[in-house]
Amino acid sequence: MPRIDVNCDMGESFGRWILGDDRGMMPHLSSVNIATGYHAGDPPTIRRTVEGAVEHGLAIGAHVAFPDLMGFGRRRMSIPPGDVEDYCLYQIGALEAFVRAAGGRLAHVKPHGALYVMASDDPALAAAIARATAKVDDSLPLVLLHRGVAAAVEAEGVRLVPEGFPDLHYDRDGHLIIEPVKRAWDPGLVADRAVRMVLDGKVNADDGTELDVEALSLCLHGDAPNGPEVAAAVRRALTANGIDVVPIAGLLSAEGGPR
C-alpha cells in the first residue's frame, strides 16, 4: 500500500493575533510543524498547539526559522552557518520542552520560510540545521524540499525527508511560488495534485511544465481561508486511492527507511 505523511505548519499565532485554523486542520493530518517563536508563536500558543497535537495523536516537529517576527521569517538573511546552528538548537530545545511537558515526543525538524528555501539549496545551511538537530536527537529527520542537499545532511547523521506542496504552485525549475497571503484553493484540485504526487511522482508547474517530485510528506496550509476543507478533501482522496496516511517515522521505520 502506498504511504504518505500529511503535515501542516501551525502555532503561528502571537498574542491576540491569530493565524490559521490549527484545530480545524488537526483531524486530517498525521504530522504538525509548530512555530518556535522566531517567525511566529509565543509560549502560550506553543503550549496550546502542542497539547492539541498530542490530543489528536499527531507527530510533532520543530518549525525553526530565521529571527524575523516582523517579516514572518520570509526575508532572506545572511547569517553564518554557526549562528544558524545555534538559532536552530535554541528553537528545537524550546519546543522539545513543551512537547515533553505534554507527554509527547519530538518527531522531526522542518525549517520555515526563507530558511527552508535557502537550506534546500545550500549545503552549508542544511548541514547547520542538521547539526543542531543531531545534538538534540540524531533520530529526528529533517524535512526539506528535495534531496539536493542530502549528502550534507546525512554527513551529520540525520535523515532528509523530501516534501511536496499540493496547495502551492511550482515554477518550471521546481521552486515554490510563495503566496504573500495564502489564498483559497479548490479542494478537488489540491486533492488531485496530492494523489498524483504520491502515485505518479508528478506535478504540473504554473506554466504547465510537468515536473518530477519526490515526496515522503505533503504539506497543507491551515492559514488558507478554506484550509480545513482542503485538508479534508485531500485525506478523503488519499484514502479513496488506497494511500495510507502515516507519520514520517512510519515511513522511515522499514529496514532503516530511505536515506
Image (cartoon, grey):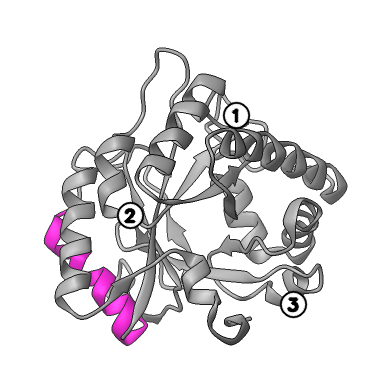
Query: Which element type, helix, strand or loop, lies under badge 1?
Result: loop
* 79 to the left or right of 239: right
Q: Which residue is mark 3?
A: 151
Q: Residue furthest front?
A: 103
Query: Which element type, helix, strand or loop, lies under badge 2?
Result: loop
Image marks 1 and 2: residues in contact by CB distance under 8 Å = no
For the C terminus, the image quarter is bottom right
- Please name which of the two marks, 3 or 2, marks the residue nearer to the observer: 2
Location of residue 3 with respect to 249 vertically, above or below = below
Q: CA distance from mark 3 to mark 2?
A: 29 Å
Location of residue 242 with respect to 58 vertically, above or below = below
Query: Which element type, helix, strand or loop, lies under badge 3?
Result: helix
- Label 3 Cα crowd, 10 Å radius (few <14 / some 14-19 / many 20+): some
The residue sitting at 29% across, 57% down in the picture is: 167
- Label 1 Cα crowd, 10 Å radius (few <14 / some 14-19 / many 20+): many
- Please name which of the two marks, 1 or 2, marks the residue nearer to the observer: 2
The amino acid at mark 3 is Ala
The residue sitting at 19% across, 72% down in the picture is: 239
Most foreground residue, 102 or 167? 102
On whether residue 196 falls in the magenta region, the answer is yes
Give the mark nearer the N terminus: 1 vs 3: 1
For the N terminus, the image quarter is bottom left
Q: Which residue is mark 2?
A: 29
Image marks 1 and 3: residues in contact by CB distance under 8 Å = no
